[in-house]
Image (spheres, grey):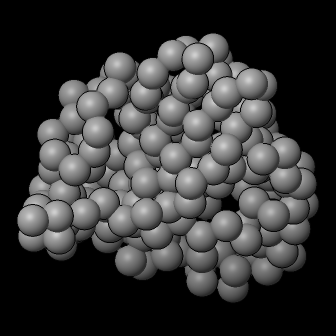
Amino acid sequence: MTSRVLLVSPAMSVSARQARFDDDGPLDDAGAARARAAAGSLPSAARVLVSPGVRCRETAAALGLAGVPAPELAGLDVGRWRGRTLEEVGAAEPDAVGRWLTDPEGAPHGGESVRDLCGRVGRLLADARALDGRTVAVVEPEVVRAAVVGALGLPLSVFWRLDVPPLTVTELSGRAGRWNLRLGRPLPTPQETG
């Protein structure tokens, strides 16, 4: 039995362009158009899950995916930093940002630590490994990072060193008690596949 989990990162949003801690804003026009152009490019799946964030829900809809909301796949809770830019927070709280980026157990923003996020996503992966077939999940980039860290047994210190571009697919395939990884590939548009 092989379980495949395709993690799709959301298309570009205004918040992402501004390096803003997610404020649950919508996709920007270019991101929505790119997602619509990639509709139909994913293989069929036994299960489709969607992170509760607006940009993940909008990306799934633009891709033509009718997914089940999955609160356990929510992005990292950044507490009181939500909606602010990294530049703003860095200027106001440089030590806190430094701690947050280097200590996986740190949550100076009053939200969730990287360790907690990785644990939450790790539990979902453990459940997914027991399922046969393909799962497609449209999730925030930090959920993709947490899944890769957990699947490969990487130290939590590498979390922030994993880049997850918008509208890419990272594939995990599980069999024989372990996961294999296929790194983020862009979703093709019909012009690229034809």
Frontmost residue, 27 versus 23: 27
| Rendered view: 55 above or below 93 | above
Q: Is residue 101 visible?
A: yes
Left or right for 79, reference 64: right
Residue 30: percent from left, percent from top = 18, 72
Q: Which residue is at 27% across, 31% downward?
A: 44
| Rendered view: 54 above or below 169 | above
Residue 37: percent from left, percent from top = 12, 61
Q: Is residue 96 visible?
A: no
Identify the image quadrant of residue 68.
top left
Residue 168: percent from left, percent from top = 41, 60
Q: Which residue is at 22% across, 28% downward?
A: 66
Left or right for 47, reference 106: left
| Rendered view: 10 above or below 66 | below
Q: Which residue is at 35% across, 46% downward?
A: 56
| Rendered view: 44 above or below 87 | above
* Figure quadrant of the C terminus: bottom left
Residue 109: percent from left, percent from top = 73, 55
Left or right for 97, reference 130: right
